[in-house]
Amino acid sequence: MTKQKILVVDDEESLCEILKFNLEIAGFEVDTTFSAEKALKLSIKDYDLILLDIMMGKMSGIQMAQILKSKMETADIPIIFCTAKDTENDTIAGFNIGADDYITKPFSVREVIARVKSVLRRTSTDSNEKISVEYEKLKVDLIRKRCILDGEKVSLTKKEMEILILFLKNRGVIFSREDILRRIWKDDVVVLDRTIDVNITRLRKKIGKYGSHIVTRLGYGYGFEE
């Protein structure tokens, strides 16, 4: 089972070490960094949750969160603010930009772990919606929009991801180019058939041995066959 991945961003190095140690014991994979600037150089989209301090160096946690929420690939990553600032305005500012929780220092490690688990449960599951679609060891997390192959993350573009989800949800169904255009490129004005071919060719390569399951039916279209 793939461990959920957490990023701790705080300029207190000793606190980062404590959180990393305890969160790893609790079963998470944890990375730490000591400034928002350094954090933004990481592949943020790979994380399931961010523990973020507000008062840091040149860039505050609030500014970093605003940047993350403005980008499609990181907008849905849950953020918990961990900060010594506990004024009403700071709390409101955090929630206004989409923070999922707010913990005021000093806090107990047990509280942090409990809050982390609670936010992850709330943001990664929905009792009325299937949260993943998979075939053997190829899996797509529909909430986090991540593709996992043999336990490793595969980097897909948005269109490649949407094509794969469409195919995995409808195994055995052959979709015409017109069907794919209508479902995947519905907001684009002009898309050439060649664009579909290129995206599917790239997708086949990226999903390794499962690429051969994406079949072409000449004169009809594409689909995923078991």
Image: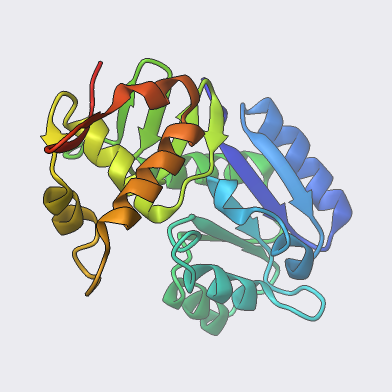
What is the quadrant of residue 21 in the picture?
A: top right
In-image side of 84 versus 204 (left or right): right
Q: Nearer the viewer, residue 58 or 44?
A: 44
Q: Is residue 180 above or below residue 187?
A: above
Q: Quadrant of the C terminus?
A: top left
Q: Residue at x 67, y 46 (%)?
A: 108
Q: Residue furthest bottom?
A: 89
Q: Nearer the viewer, residue 139 or 104?
A: 139
Whole-percent x and y of residue 98? 44, 69
Q: Residue furthest right?
A: 14
Whole-percent x and y of residue 221? 17, 39
Callout count: 0
Whole-percent x and y of residue 19? 73, 43
Q: Residue at x 45, y 42 (%)?
A: 202
Q: Is residue 102 above or below residue 54?
A: above
Q: Would residue 224 be visible to someone looking at this image?
A: yes
Q: Is residue 8 above or below residue 165?
A: below
Q: Nearer the viewer, residue 28 or 149?
A: 149
Q: Would residue 122 be visible to someone looking at this image?
A: no
Q: Residue at x 37, y 22 (%)?
A: 212
- What colour-coding does the image apply? rainbow
Q: Residue furthest front?
A: 219
Q: Nearer the viewer, residue 145 or 13?
A: 145
What is the quadrant of residue 167 in the picture?
A: top left
Whole-percent x and y of residue 18? 80, 42
Q: Residue at x 73, y 68 (%)?
A: 36
Q: Is residue 83 above or below residue 58?
A: above
In-image side of 56 versus 70 (left or right): right
In-image side of 204 versus 85 (left or right): left
